[in-house]
Image (cartoon, helix red, strand yellow):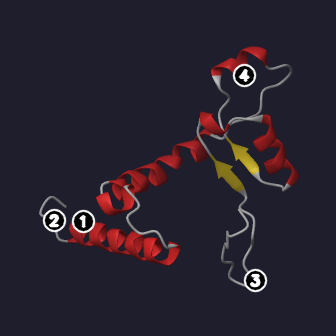
Amino acid sequence: MNAVRIPRPIGRPRQRPAALAGDKGYSYPRIRHWLRRHGIQAVIPLRSDQAARHRGRPPELDRDAYRRRSVIECCMSWLKECRRLATRFEKLARNYLAMVKVAIIQRYLRILFSDGT
């Protein structure tokens, strides 16, 4: 989270997002507490075992924001199609980032020059 830089029209970039979306695997009190302490809205549904034991009002879930998570999930699945990225052939972070960029460029070119679109 410390590496996040969100550009703004004026001034320096923000370092904290307004909201963080995650699946049920991230539904832990420690994570929710950290997000609350840093002023970040948690868009994480409750796990079924937590919903049964939860006292009081359950945390609200912004369903529209949670649905927008699918864009990221699709992007990650596209990147996992590249065997080089999925098996992490590149050990250095800068080389791995370069391969991620090449994979994204390849994906865009495939979409741009396909006959189906």
Distance from Cα at disc 3 to Cα at disc 4:
39 Å
Element on which disc 3 rests: loop
Distance from Cα at disc 4 to Cα at disc 1:
42 Å
Q: Earlier in the sequence, mark 3 or mark 2?
A: 3
Q: Give the residue at mark 1.
A: 111
* 4 vs 2, front mark: 4
Element on which disc 1 rests: helix
Write the residue at 72% across / 78% down.
13
Q: Give the residue at mark 2.
A: 114
Task: Give yes or no for contact between labels 2 and 1 (Cβ–Cβ under 8 Å).
Answer: yes
Label at residue 12: 3
Distance from Cα at disc 2 to Cα at disc 1:
5 Å
Q: Residues within 10 Å of mark 2 (few under 14, many from 20)?
A: few
Element on which disc 4 rests: helix
Element on which disc 2 rests: loop
Label at residue 50: 4
Give the image location of residue 32, x and y in percent: 78, 42
* 4 vs 1, front mark: 4
The disc labelled 2 sits on which kind of residue?
Ser
Distance from Cα at disc 1 to Cα at disc 3:
34 Å
Q: Earlier in the sequence, mark 4 or mark 2?
A: 4
The disc labelled 3 sits on which kind of residue?
Arg
Position of 39 with respect to 17 (left or right) is right
Q: Earlier in the sequence, mark 1 or mark 3?
A: 3
Give the image location of residue 3, x and y in percent: 68, 70
Q: Earlier in the sequence, mark 4 or mark 1?
A: 4
Q: Nearer the viewer, residue 117 or 40?
A: 40
Which quadrant does the C terminus fall into?
bottom left
Write the residue at 44% across / 71% down.
96
Label at residue 32: none
